Image (spheres, grey):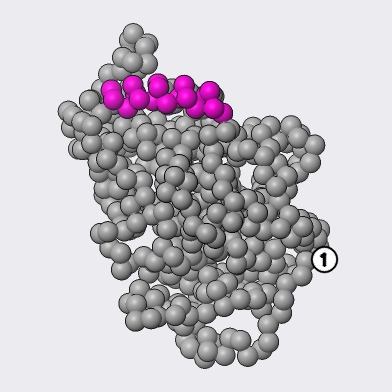
Amino acid sequence: MLYIPRLSPHVFTRSLSRSVATVASRKPKAEGSIAAIFTSLDANKSADSLPERFGQLKRDIFRESLVQSWREVVAEIEAVTDKVVAKGSEIIPTVSYADIRKGLSPEQAQIIKDVGSVIVSGAVPPEEALEWKASIRAYVEENKPRIKGFPENDVQVFELYNTKAQMAARTHPAILETQRALLSLWHSEVSPANVSLTTPISYFDRLRIRNPGDMQFTLGPHVNGGSLERWEDPTFRSFYGRILEGGSNWRLHDPFDAGKRMGSVQDLYHTPNQCTIFRPFQGWTSISETGPGEGTLRLLPFLKLSSAYILLRPFFRPSASGHLSDWELDLDTTSFPGARIGTTQELNPKTHPHLRLDETMVAVPKVQPGDQVYWHCDIVHAVEAAHQGKTDSSVMYIPAVPLTVANADYLRDQRVCFEKGLPPPDFPGGDGESHNTGRGTVDDIATAEGRRAIGFEPFPTNEEPLFDEANRVLGL
């Protein structure tokens, strides 16, 4: 039985006495499932040719010095991929929650930044995580006629966002403390007053309970947070400015510069499942014991180099020689390999052959219930095509997201949806859990920090303009 402390009726007097939004400003997205944004999950989707404006976009961005960049990146990939293949899953760093509490060492921080991902063990007791899973199963059983997800005939990726277990996990003190530590790996010299990297807020996402033998949730290599938007949106493109400057400047690309990343438009086409906020780390919290071969996460463990390759890839194509080291310019087509309007950026051995994805996408090492896994928003990741284990492979998707004014604006609309039992604004719309019994409510959140993280308690201002503005946006 899941235990969540109840709050006394007076807790929200201050918040409820103010003008709190009851209608979301964002237009709901179309109904559907996680399959809506991935061609690898929908056999009916094909790589349609892009409008001519994308050919012009390539020519506008291109400069001759990108030829040198391409050659350097391809040469470096060859050396790095050999190392990744040799190390396998061991290349993914693991730190303990005790390390988080005392502060990551410079060496730990640098490894996480280089690889772009990390496992955090020991923050949540295994028995507590397993109670969360039991609670979810009971909720699914109680509301079975209304449960949706992927695949439709045997749901394992659930369109559930408002369960009591998810609320307990998102606002768990140890998980919020972990997120605070990881967000602090980012920096913002350009606009430090516009983001608080020590104030995590909650971005609601779905959950997965994947059964042994499943071969339908074949989520191929991809990068979330837009596809064509990386080149099409000027602010998003400027985040990769060093890569697109040409020459050896790609080596100066800083994947952890929050000031340059904020303000990027990641969803130009109002696509279900497309993240619209500044989400530095994607992540999940495990509610099962899961290891390689058991339907787990796979990661491409070289962040800066893979980003440079992905950004440069549309400007080059295979030559008649067929050699990977001998590609030619591609400025006369609209091709952006793996990118389509209204989908995420996908990759495969044909579209991005230099990455050797069949060998370099390494499975996350074995995790226990309560362990957390986080990966940078630009990391290529996938899910193992087959679950060959004997027990379920289950996670709650919980990313690390900082407070910004734009993120607070999203948090306000997410709060409205949560109170009505509807899906969060970025996800497939419809009635969601509005007719379900036993879903989570704000009364289930036991701490002030947890209530702040989901937008029900004001942020302490301390004369900080960001917090004042966030509270104004939230109506608190």
* Residue 164 place in picture, x, y as percent: 70, 67
Where residue 405 sits in the image (x, y, percent)? 37, 69
The residue at 32%/45% (across/down) is 254
Look at the image and give the residue range highlighted in magenta: 71-88
Task: Assign the magenta stretch its main secondary structure.
Answer: helix
Q: Is the N terminus in the top left, top right, bottom left or bottom right quadrant?
A: bottom right
Pick the residue in front: 457 or 427: 457
Q: Amino acid at mark 1?
A: Met
> What x and y, as percent, mark residue 421?
63, 69
The answer to whether residue 377 shows anywhere in this view is no
Q: Residue at x 31, y 32 (%)?
A: 312
Residue bearing mark 1: 1
Left or right: 136 in relation to 379: right
User: What residue is shown at x 49% (from left), y 34% (from top)?
Assistant: 300
Q: Residue furthest left?
A: 64
Give the class, few, some or many, for how many residues have Cα within 10 Å of label 1's Cα (few <14, many ≥20): few
The image quarter containing residue 138 is bottom right
Q: Is residue 294 magenta?
A: no
Q: Please tell me whether residue 470 is drawn above or below residue 176 in the rendered image.
A: below
Q: Is residue 393 above or below residue 129?
A: above
Tell whether 151 sits left or right of 425: right
The total number of labels drawn is 1
- Residue at the image point whose x is 77% and y is 57% from the top: 127
State the SS at label 1.
loop
Q: Eyeballing the image, is 329 above or below 23?
A: above
